[in-house]
Image: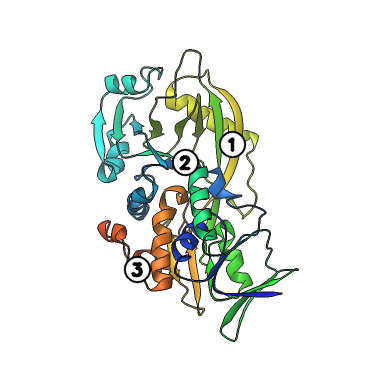
Amino acid sequence: MQDRFEFLILGGGLAGLAVAAALAPHRRLCLVEREAWLCRHASGRAAAMFIPTYGGPVVSRLARASRGLLAPDLLEPRAALHLASEETDLAAVQQWGRGRRIDAAEIAKLAPGLRAGATALGFLETDAGLIDLAGLVDRLRRAVLRHGPIVTGFEAETIERRQGCWRLRSAERTLAGAVLVNAAGPWADETARLAGVQPLGLQSYRRTLIEAAPPPAVEVRTWPILKQANGQGYLRPAGDAVWASACEETPSPPCDAQSDPLSVALACESLNDLTGRTEWTPTAHWAGLRSFAADRDPVAGWATDAADYFWIAGLGGSGVQCAPALGQAAAAMLGGAPWPEALVAEDLTAALLSPQRLRRVPIGDQ
């Protein structure tokens, strides 16, 4: 059995969903996922925070361009409080962030129960928030299904291009498309090799999160997101609990990432350091992979060594806040549509996202 489409989008994480949702109203496509359900790996394990300064300048611009696609119903306004003990740690966030400096007294008002002396300096990023991840996935999924199919549980045994057409073969069926979009997340390079395309040199890193109940008499529901300005930890309110991470980067091959006792202990220690308290009670833990290109910026664009092969990869754990705009950018490049106004407003160009830039960056420079 063979089904033919104009576009095959391989990967049902947020990146693949976003480009499929943007492109589906205009082109015949099929979204293909190896797992039994969408967002099984990195996309479904994210902390779901909207922090425009979290990442480099390109990630920051993509996040801001995504705001209009998330707000108001998928984005709950929630300021992000960047904490530091040294002025130099706040330099980058003050350069890119929209907000203001605050002192220890205001920090105590924003996060009552935070132990005095845990931090001396703060920058309040006022355009941050919490993203409804399940709602975002459902919205994108429905947008795709209004116009085309989503095929799950499809394990591509071969990927080849013959007679101007890409063919994905599994044990049960064959899918064919004029254009192949590689949105396979941590498996993007493996997918490229299977297709005979030069990999980008992506590197995946494992990161662990914990859920923890607060100390007695500490109400965290109204807390802002708390983040170490030096990048060594964060927490976000999650109902009556918090999610927290030490922001570790443990190199990993593509896999179903699992937390381990050491990484959980590091997350607990980071939470203690961030809040100046040790009475947190861990109740759950999990891990996901964050995949980066050599320059750590997202990739979206045509391959330089294969016809009709398009990359969307290397979102580095920022997919939940960047994928909406990145999907529109990719759809514009794929479908020849005008460049989205939100990207123009943020001075984001196709060249900044193109995989061609990586051919000038040594793969080992991670």
Residue furthest toward the right? 171
Q: How many marks?
A: 3
**Residue hosting label 1:** 263
**Residue hosting label 2:** 132
Tell me whether circle 2 and circle 1 mark residues in contact (CB < 8 Å): no
Depth check: 193 or 118 in front? 193
Q: Based on the displayed image, in which of its 4 quarters is residue 172 positioned?
A: bottom right
Residue furthest toward the front? 146
Q: Given the image, on which type of amino acid does mark 1 rest?
A: Ser
Q: Secondary structure at mark 1?
A: helix
Q: Give the x, y percent position of residue 137.
A: 52, 49
- Label located before the other in sequence (2 or 1): 2
Depth check: 237 or 28 in front? 28
In the drawing, what numbered circle is on residue 351? 3
Quarter in which the N terminus is drawn: bottom right
Q: Give the x, y percent position of residue 255.
A: 64, 52
Residue at point 59%, 87% (across, down): 163
Classify mark 3: residues with Cα within 10 Å, few (<14), some (14-19) or many (20+). few
Q: Given the image, on which type of amino acid does mark 3 rest?
A: Ala
Q: Given the image, on which type of amino acid does mark 2 rest?
A: Asp
Above or below — where is 32 with respect to 116? below
Classify mark 1: residues with Cα within 10 Å, few (<14), some (14-19) or many (20+). many
Residue at point 62%, 60% (across, down): 33
Q: Secondary structure at mark 3?
A: helix
Above or below — where is 347 with respect to 68? below
Classify mark 2: residues with Cα within 10 Å, few (<14), some (14-19) or many (20+). some
Distance (Cα) linking label 2 and label 1: 26 Å
Q: Based on the displayed image, in which of its 4 quarters is residue 358 positioned?
A: bottom left
Tell me whether circle 3 and circle 1 mark residues in contact (CB < 8 Å): no
Above or below — where is 213 with respect to 179? above
Q: Secondary structure at mark 2?
A: loop
In the drawing, what numbered circle is on residue 363? none
